[in-house]
Image: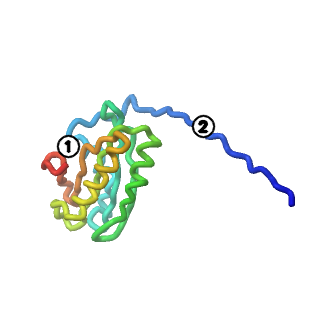
Amino acid sequence: MKQTKERVAEIQVSYRPAISNKPVIISALDAFVEIVEFFPPDTIALQEKFVVMYLNRCNRVLGVYPLSIGGITGTMVDIRLILSVALKVAATGIILAHNHPSGNLQPSSADKDLTGKIKDACKYFDISLFDHLIIAPDRKYFSFADEGEL
């Protein structure tokens, strides 16, 4: 029986972010202004969406990743995907955001539990979780950081 060797691919890493004109986030309002655009007015009252904003060490936005779109009362959030994207873009901070189609801005116990899990997971990679925003269809928001929930 002839044995063949499989070739192993070389991994090559490059990093060339174009961030010179990206906004700097210093408050929950700054984050909201940038991230609300990822919640289309046509669907914000219909289904939940979860997005993650990635920041560099100077709190300059590297980009926003639309993590998931769900149903009327929830959406799937995979912490491994959040962190894998953070590592790929060399982020040192993240801001989470999701909408409540009902318009209720109060975080549910599931929202609080998830935020705690993500915060704990971020610690292993020295990534800061700066905030978690809940956005309502009327474009109002709740900030975990401003309310002392982080």
Residue 59 lies, with reference to residue 132, above or below; the image says above
Q: Circle 1 sits in a helix, a strand or a loop, which is it?
A: helix
The image position of residue 104, as x and y in percent, is 17, 64
**Quick one: which residue is furthest to the right in this view?**
1
Nearer to us in this view, 30 or 131: 131
Q: Specify the label residue 12 is tagged with.
A: 2
The image position of residue 100, as x and y in percent, is 24, 63
- Residue at the spot x=13%, y=49% of the render? 147
Q: Specify the label residue 29 is tagged with.
A: 1
- Residue at the spot x=44%, y=42% of the render? 87
> Left or right of 140: which side holds 79?
right
The quadrant in which the N terminus is found is bottom right
Quarter-of-image position of residue 78: bottom left
Residue 129 lies, with reference to residue 109, above or below; the image says above
> Left or right of 80: which side holds 74?
left
Nearer to us in this view, 3 or 129: 3
Q: Specify the label residue 129 is tagged with.
A: none
Amino acid identity at mark 1: Leu
- Asked if the residues shown at circle 1 and circle 2 are in contact, with their CB atoms under 8 angstroms apart, the answer is no
The image position of residue 83, as x and y in percent, is 40, 49
Residue 113 lies, with reference to residue 56, above or below; the image says below
* Category of crowding for the residue at label 2, using alpha-carbon neighbours closer than 10 angstroms: few (below 14), some (14–19), many (at least 20): few
Q: Circle 2 sits in a helix, a strand or a loop, which is it?
A: loop
Q: Earlier in the sequence, mark 1 or mark 2?
A: 2
Residue 45 lies, with reference to residue 97, above or below; the image says below
**Quick one: which residue is furthest to the top in this view?**
20
- Residue at the spot x=36%, y=44% of the render? 124
Amino acid identity at mark 2: Gln
The image position of residue 30, as x and y in percent, is 23, 40
